Image (tube, rainbow, N blue to C red):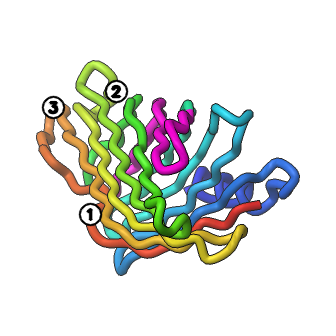
């Protein structure tokens, strides 16, 4: 619980001179806060906290390389460290690799479609976590230079195993979400 408060404090007290974007999305059972900082024009670092009611918390921190292929297509490739604090199952950690592909139609640059996927096989999962998978699909609309609204679907799952528990496909986050990304 102390880690949650420390993360929220860090997000709240970070000066806007260093900030690039702060995302907040939710559904009926889950809340996600993500802070993203551009290290330069090609590299981004981010930290996120996801709380799912009656399940637990996930903390992530990552680094991605951004590549813009043309005006309509861009991609990010990288990795993230994942720590899952579970209310009923053992905790686990993983180092997931993956990325995002974003398509912006030429007809209207205010709209975009993004697909994100990350995976950590058993060799990159530690503690009682056997593997980790994350999938997100979302539609975005640029309301202004400072705000992007989005709606989508997110599915985060993990497998756990220790001497007393074996659980496959545990849903860490599963469902529709609506949110906004604030650009600084």
**Image mark for residue 174:** 1
Give left or right: position of 175 versus 14.
left
Residue 36 colored magenta? no
Residue mark closest to the camera, 3 vs 1: 1
Closer to the N terminus: mark 3 or mark 1?
Answer: 3
For disc 2, the neighbor class at 10 Å (few under 14, some 14 to 19, many from 20) is some
Q: Is residue 29 or residue 135 the one in the foreground? A: 135
Q: Residue at x 60, y 66 (%)?
A: 181
Distance from disc 2 to disc 3, alpha carbons, whole Å, reads: 15 Å
Looking at the rendering, the stretch of residues picked out in magenta corresponds to 66-87
Q: Residue at x 33, y 43 (%)?
A: 117
User: Where residue 18 sits in the image (x, y, percent)?
Assistant: 82, 48
Magenta-colored segment: predominant secondary structure? strand
- Looking at this view, name the residue that lies furthest to the bottom: 28
Q: Which residue is mark 3?
A: 163
How many numbered tags mark residues here? 3
């Amino acid at each position: 619980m102390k880690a949650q408060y420390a993360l929220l404090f860090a997000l709240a007290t970070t000066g806007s001179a260093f900030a690039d974007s702060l995302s907040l999305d939710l559904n009926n059972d889950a809340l996600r806060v993500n802070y993203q900082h551009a290290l330069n024009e090609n590299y981004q670092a981010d930290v996120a906290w996801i709380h799912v009611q009656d399940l637990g918390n996930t903390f992530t921190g990552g680094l991605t390389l951004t590549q813009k292929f043309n005006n309509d297509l861009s991609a990010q490739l990288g990795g993230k460290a994942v720590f899952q604090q579970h209310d009923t199952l053992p905790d686990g950690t993983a180092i997931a690799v993956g990325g995002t592909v974003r398509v912006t139609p030429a007809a209207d640059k205010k709209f975009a479609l993004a697909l994100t996927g990350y995976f950590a096989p058993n060799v990159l999962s530690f503690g009682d976590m056997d593997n980790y998978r994350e999938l997100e699909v979302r539609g975005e609309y640029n309301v202004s230079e400072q705000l992007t609204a989005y709606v989508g679907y997110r599915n985060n799952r993990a497998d756990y195993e220790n001497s007393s528990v074996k659980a496959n496909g545990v849903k860490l986050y599963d469902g529709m979400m609506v949110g906004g990304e604030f650009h600084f």
